[in-house]
Image (spheres, rainbow, N blue to C red):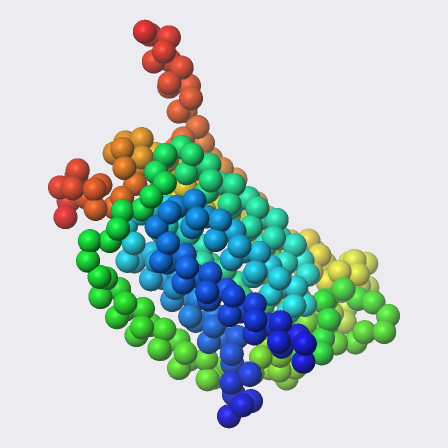
């Protein structure tokens, strides 16, 4: 029982964080807050990958004398790429927010729907 | 032992910060809390032996993302989120069901730090054993990023280029347009 808790604690918290981000995206109307929610979701996925790459009693994957156990370098590489791509998508999303503010004068979702009469 | 303690504490901090972000209305506070969230996760990456990822997250996640969000806040001049008109029951239900399914799914994942898990037994050990001879870089993450999976990095650069063009097309002409309007007057 205690093994299961310690062995899966990381994954459970990652799920909680993921759902916190997801909830912010689908329940809040403010576009900047939505982007913050997307970022929380993104970071939780990074945490999931790095947790999977972790090896007990290992060290960072830099070859040095006196160390034989290293954590898995492959998830680290994938997440390095993902972090940078994440910032690119955040920048694009925020540019869209600025443009929406220019066109509609608001960044609240329901006010935009009211103006478009789309809901 | 101390690693586990730091791990548990930082993860708890992350949950508190995420809940605070959901509850706060002031957008400036939300952005600052988000920066803090990134910093905590960078610390967590360092604890989990991912030094390169920790650097990148601290610089890019906590730094550049925050600056971009603050810039947007300055441009949109909207500092307070509108209070929600009703309690969001349906989203809460969706989130609880999805979260429950995901937690159920974690039981099949090998335990945290298990050296015999499938992720640790396929291509990872090859990089660690041969990385230094093949590329003469002692840092295996660098070797994989720049050599073994160099095409991934090329794809990443393409994505950033595309995003940069997108941002320029969306808001790059703003200043010029404003200037033109002024000239016409």
Name the spot of residue B139 as percent of width and height, x first.
75, 60
Q: Nearer the viewer, residue A68 or A4?
A: A4
Res. A98 visible in picture: yes
Name the spot of residue B40 as percent of width and height, x first.
57, 60
Residue farthest toward the right in the current orientation of the protein: A65
Q: Which quadrant, please, contains the C terminus of chain B?
A: top left
- In the image, residue B136 sits, relative to residue B115, either above or below, namely above
x 68%, y 76%: residue: B2
Name the spot of residue B151 as percent of width and height, x first.
60, 53
- In the image, residue B172 sits, relative to residue A65, either above or below, namely above
Residue farthest toward the bottom in the current orientation of the protein: A1
x 72%, y 75%: residue: A58
Q: Which quadrant, please, contains the N terminus of chain B?
A: bottom right
- In the image, residue A87 sits, relative to residue A62, either above or below, namely above
Res. B166 visible in picture: no
Q: Left of A87 or right of it: where is B116?
A: right
Q: Left of B26 or right of it: where is B35?
A: right
């Amino acid at each position: 029982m205690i093994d299961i808790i310690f062995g899966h604690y990381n994954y459970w918290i990652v799920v909680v964080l993921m759902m916190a981000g997801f909830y912010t995206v689908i329940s809040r109307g403010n576009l900047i807050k939505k982007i913050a929610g997307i970022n929380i979701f993104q970071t939780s996925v990074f945490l999931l990958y790095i947790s999977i790459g972790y090896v007990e009693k290992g060290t960072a994957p830099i070859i040095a004398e006196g160390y034989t156990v290293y954590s898995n370098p492959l998830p680290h590489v994938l997440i390095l790429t993902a972090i940078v791509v994440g910032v690119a998508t955040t920048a694009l999303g925020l540019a869209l927010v600025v443009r929406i503010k220019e066109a509609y004068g608001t960044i609240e979702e329901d006010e935009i729907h009211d103006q478009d009469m789309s809901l | 032992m101390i690693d586990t303690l730091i791990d548990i504490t930082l993860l708890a901090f992350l949950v508190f910060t995420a809940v605070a972000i959901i509850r706060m209305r002031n957008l400036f506070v939300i952005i600052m809390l988000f920066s803090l969230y990134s910093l905590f996760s960078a610390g967590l990456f360092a604890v989990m032996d991912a030094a390169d990822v920790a650097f990148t997250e601290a610089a890019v996640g906590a730094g550049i993302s925050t600056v971009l969000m603050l810039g947007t806040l300055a441009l949109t001049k909207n500092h307070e989120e509108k209070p929600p008109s009703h309690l969001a029951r349906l989203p809460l239900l969706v989130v609880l069901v999805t979260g429950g399914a995901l937690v159920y799914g974690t039981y099949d994942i090998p335990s945290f730090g298990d050296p015999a898990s499938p992720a640790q037994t396929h291509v990872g050990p090859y990089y660690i054993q041969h990385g230094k001879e093949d590329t003469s870089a002692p840092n295996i993450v660098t070797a994989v990023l720049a050599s073994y999976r160099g095409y991934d990095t090329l794809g990443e650069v393409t994505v950033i280029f595309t995003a940069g063009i997108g941002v320029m097309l969306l808001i790059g002409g703003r200043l010029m347009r404003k200037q033109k309007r002024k000239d016409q007057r």
